Amino acid sequence: MEEIRRTPLFDVHRRLGARFVEFAGWQMPVRYSGLMEEHRAVRSSCGLFDVSHMGEIEVSGTGALEAVSYITTNDPVSLNDGQCQYTLICNERGGVKDDTILYRIGPESYLFCVNASNTEKVYDWIRANVPAGVKVANVSDAYAQIAIQGPRAEEVIGRVSDTRFSDLKGFHFTSTVLCGEDVIVSRTGYTGEDGFEIYLAPSAAPRIWQALMDAGSASGILPCGLGARDSLRTEMGYPLYGCELDEDTTPVEAGLKRFVSLKKGDFMGRAVIVRQMESRGRKKLVGFEMEEDGIPRAGYRILKNARLVGTVTSGTFSPSLNRPIGMGYVETGADGMDGRMEIEVEVRGKGRRARIVRPPFYRHKERAAGVC
């Protein structure tokens, strides 16, 4: 049996009284004070997340740009040094092997941030599909990662650095110093709020975590676990690998074709993806809001006129909207799957009324720097 891993911040979480769960082979905090409180802190002030379980893979050397372009759906040619983009890595059938953030360090140097459950799989896939001479390295052990998210994130991180983070645009990153430690700070996140993801040496993680907590004490900062991370991303309609994304689901079916660039030439899975863009896939991802009591959960059945048309992939009670919401896949040919059409979600064996809506479920006036 594979040993459960712990992040460099495990002892910090334990002192904070975190409740832990196993996630992707890691022992991770799922909540501290409570999901609702943590979720609302991120929407109204800011929250701090340990995301050190995420993987990092470097691709470098002559031909790195062409290699990265071939194994991803988005167009890395559009990136300048210090920019990053959301992109997908697909198999030959167009199925998603992982959704990632790709960072351009330099013209021949790129860094992927990949999902924890897929790190080794993606590393092996990239190595097998780049030409000789392009270097691929799994550098995950060299990084811890902390995310500070929320409308007050900029003022808090600004208190522990001399860098003007107001100059850092969304999907840009910079090398800087926090608390005397060299770090990379990226204006990205997975919550739908403004925020930053900090890549740093594992040994520096406890000190920088505490410095951010101290700096944010007057701003309402809270430590946040995987529970709030999941409810926040669900409110935005962001996909989670293993729920909305897998190797049998294409970007078109997942509603992510805006992250597919056809102008750049050939890439892995292109032929299948192009066919689906022209004729639609076998299924499509939809969002829905419950109109009757019942929390939708992954695996619950979606019904239309008492006929099975799909399956829930993610569901939660939305703290921001004060009602249950969810996402799921339905047949592309099912009638009434667009607009605010009525469906039923089978909750514990009983059909509960719901309506199809287009995510994001939660909207605010200012666009955040989130992944989608």
Image: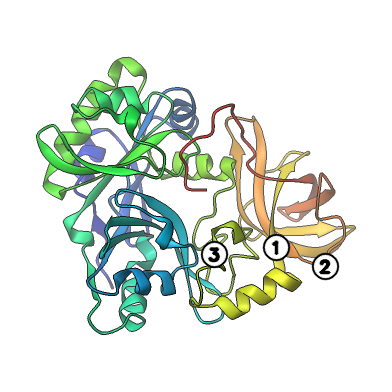
The local crowd at label 1, few if under 14, some if 14 to 19, many if 20 or more residues have their Cα within 10 Å, is many
Q: What residue appears at the point 65 percent right and 65 percent down from the top-left corner?
A: 253
Q: Nearer the viewer, residue 99 or 49?
A: 99
Residue 172: x %, y % from top left: 35, 44
Residue 169: x %, y % from top left: 39, 37
Q: Nearer the viewer, residue 143 or 274?
A: 274
**Amino acid at the residue labelled 3:** Ser
Q: Residue 330 falls in which quadrant of the image?
A: bottom right
Residue tagged 3: 261
**Amino acid at the residue labelled 1:** Lys
Distance from Cα at disc 3 to Cα at disc 2 = 26 Å
The local crowd at label 2, few if under 14, some if 14 to 19, many if 20 or more residues have their Cα within 10 Å, is few
Residue tagged 2: 333
Q: Nearer the viewer, residue 204 or 193?
A: 193
Residue tagged 1: 284
Which comes before the other along the chain, label 3 or label 2? Answer: 3
Question: Cβ–Cβ below 8 Å for labels 1 and 2?
Answer: no
